[in-house]
């Protein structure tokens, strides 16, 4: 039983030993093996940038399924983001309740939409594609509640820009592989991975790391015995003699 007042022990996901004494895996090897495993990935636009931005805010601290439900509720009820911007936080909150944290997310979504309208005169964010990547990120990060992850998702998924979104799966898997140092948090990992990965490989590698994190390199216990990266991963639980 944990004693009152003491912090719970960190999960095994954060304490994987570097069992093999191996150096960090190389980005090139990781990419090529995961591409062989999961197949080639081509970028296709998902939503327009405003929809992507709203969906990403709704995705914070909830499942993709619930975020999508909340997103659809909003669009079904209002029909446009311009009308959402005119709604009260209470109206928005009722519609996104299914996505959790509606009291935080409802005023945030309204504020983000209104700020964009004030700054740009409309809800069209396509101008971001013409900016250098860093400027586009900075522009988005000045919006209330928008951080590096949300900015990277919008730029990458909606506009096809070479940003590297880092979610919990990407962060965990890339730390275990040594692509990101243990003390680097998810916000700083965006920059580390962008520097390490060629632009044309960032979107596919992001998708590969998420897929690998969900299927194999799970938290808290990774399935190293089934992992195509086991022989190059410094956190592998597979003994050296048994690795491929
Ligand atoms: S599942 Fe693969 S990537 Fe994850 S810790 Fe094990 S060997 Fe490394």
Image: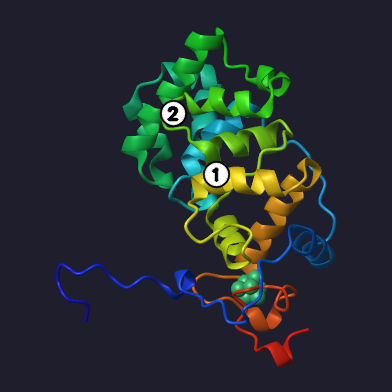
Tell me which residue sits at (84%, 60%) in the image. Answer: 39
**Which secondary structure, mark 1?**
helix
Whether residues under marks 2 and 1 lie with C-beta atoms below 8 angstroms apart, the answer is: no
Farthest top residue?
A: 121
**Which secondary structure, mark 2?**
helix
Tell me which residue sits at (54%, 51%) in the image. Answer: 65
Q: Position of residue 190 (x, y in %)?
A: 59, 45
Determine if residue 79 is in view: no
Q: Position of residue 94 (x, y in %)?
A: 36, 35
* Front-lying residue, 117 or 227: 227
* Front-lying residue, 97 or 206: 206
- Ligand 1 in which quarter: bottom right
Tell me the tag on residue 68: 1
Q: Relative to residue 228, is residue 210 drawn left or right?
A: left
Q: Quadrant of the N terminus?
A: bottom left
Neighbourhood count class around disc 1 (C-alpha, 10 Å): few under 14, some 14–19, many 20 upward: some
Residue corresponding to mark 2: 109
């Amino acid at each position: 039983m944990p004693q009152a007042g003491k912090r719970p022990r960190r999960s095994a996901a954060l304490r994987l030993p570097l069992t093999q004494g191996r150096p960090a895996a190389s980005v090139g090897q990781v990419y090529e093996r995961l591409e062989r495993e999961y197949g080639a990935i081509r970028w296709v636009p998902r939503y327009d940038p405003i929809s992507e931005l709203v969906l990403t805010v709704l995705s914070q601290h909830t499942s993709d399924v619930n975020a999508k439900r909340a997103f659809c509720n909003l669009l079904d009820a209002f029909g446009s983001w311009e009308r959402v911007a005119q709604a009260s936080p209470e109206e928005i909150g009722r519609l996104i309740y299914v996505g959790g944290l509606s009291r935080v997310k409802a005023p945030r979504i309204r504020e983000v939409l209104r700020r964009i309208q004030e700054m740009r005169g409309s809800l069209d964010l396509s101008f971001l594609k013409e900016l250098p990547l860093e400027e586009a990120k900075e522009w988005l990060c000045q919006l209330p509640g928008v951080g590096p992850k949300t900015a990277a998702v919008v730029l990458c998924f909606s506009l096809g820009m070479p940003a590297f979104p880092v979610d919990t799966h990407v962060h965990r898997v890339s730390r275990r592989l040594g692509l990101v140092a243990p003390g680097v948090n998810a916000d700083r990992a965006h920059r580390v991975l962008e520097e390490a990965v060629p632009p044309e490989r960032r979107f596919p590698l992001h998708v590969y790391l998420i897929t690998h994190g969900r299927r194999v390199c799970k938290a808290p216990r990774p399935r190293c015995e089934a992992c195509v990266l086991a022989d190059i991963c410094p956190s592998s639980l597979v003994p050296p003699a048994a690795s491929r």
